């Protein structure tokens, strides 16, 4: 996104508490930020809420903004961090996750669930393929076949601690992969599923 005309001056005014300057920044960056966040969450009302949260954060920390640096980069970094926090919150908060699912169901009366399920499976398979063979074996035994760490260690001929380490690193890798390549709903479902 290109800088708005006299952006440095507007940012300086906003830093000093000028609400009209803040409104100018908001109007300029809102459309692009909305599209960016919608790519993550796929729910227009949630994307709009996330945009408002991001701009609220910008207002709260306006004194820290350096007008000489790229405001766009700063804004999108705040937005990305906020989306990741929201994913974790969705994974932990069953009521919030249920509300998001309801919004999705109201929005789409098609086979959206099948599409999401296929997308999750595709992303999971891509992430799984990126694991080492040993981590794939550990993950398959412990998560997909329900074996205990001790049972997996005996089958693979490695220590229980090695199994545990492989599981932790596998889950972290899969979560990171889906965060980077999926949307917010898929990532939150994946995190919730892996925590069970």
Image (spheres, rainbow, N blue to C red):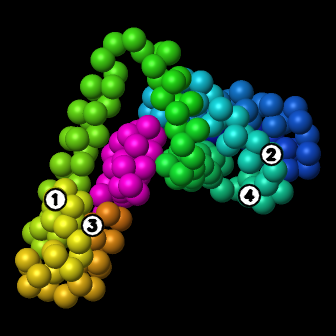
Q: Distance between the Cα atoms at labels 2 and 4?
A: 13 Å
Element type where label 2 sits in the image:
helix
Q: Nearer the viewer, mark 3 or mark 2?
A: 3
Looking at the rendering, the stretch of residues picked out in magenta corresponds to 173-196
User: Residue 117 lies in what quarter of the image?
Assistant: top left
What residue is pinned by disc 2? 59
Q: Distance between the Cα atoms at labels 3 and 1?
A: 16 Å
Residue 97, x across and y down, in percent? 52, 38
What residue is pinned by disc 1? 145
What residue is pinned by disc 4? 66
Residue 174, magenta (yes or no): yes
* Most frequent secondary structure within the magenta stretch: helix
Residue 161, x across and y down, in percent? 27, 86
Quadrant (top left, top right, bottom left, bottom right) of the C terminus:
bottom left
What residue is pinned by disc 3? 170
Horizontal side of 158 relative to 127 (left or right) equals left
Query: How many residues crowd mark 3 within 10 Å: few (<14), some (14–19), many (20+)?
Result: many
Q: Nearer the viewer, mark 1 or mark 4?
A: 1
Q: Nearer the viewer, mark 4 or mark 3?
A: 3
**Label located before the other in sequence (3 or 1):** 1
């Amino acid at each position: 996104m290109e800088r708005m005309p006299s952006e440095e001056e507007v940012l300086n005014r906003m830093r000093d508490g000028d609400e009209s300057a803040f409104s100018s920044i908001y109007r300029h960056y809102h459309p692009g930020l909305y599209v960016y966040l919608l790519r993550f969450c796929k729910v227009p009302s949630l994307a709009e809420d996330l945009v408002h949260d991001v701009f609220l954060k910008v207002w709260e920390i306006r004194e820290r903004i350096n007008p000489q640096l790229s405001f766009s980069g700063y804004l999108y970094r705040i937005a990305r961090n906020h989306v990741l926090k929201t994913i974790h919150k969705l994974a932990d908060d069953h009521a919030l996750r249920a509300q998001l699912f309801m919004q999705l169901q109201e929005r789409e009366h098609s086979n959206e669930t099948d599409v999401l399920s296929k997308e999750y499976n595709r992303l999971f398979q891509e992430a799984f393929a990126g694991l080492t063979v040993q981590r794939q074996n550990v993950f398959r035994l412990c998560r997909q076949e329900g074996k205990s760490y001790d049972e997996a260690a005996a089958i693979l001929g490695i220590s229980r601690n090695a199994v545990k380490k492989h599981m932790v690193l596998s889950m972290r890798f899969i979560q990171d992969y889906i965060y980077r390549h999926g949307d917010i709903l898929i990532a939150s479902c994946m995190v919730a599923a892996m925590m069970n």
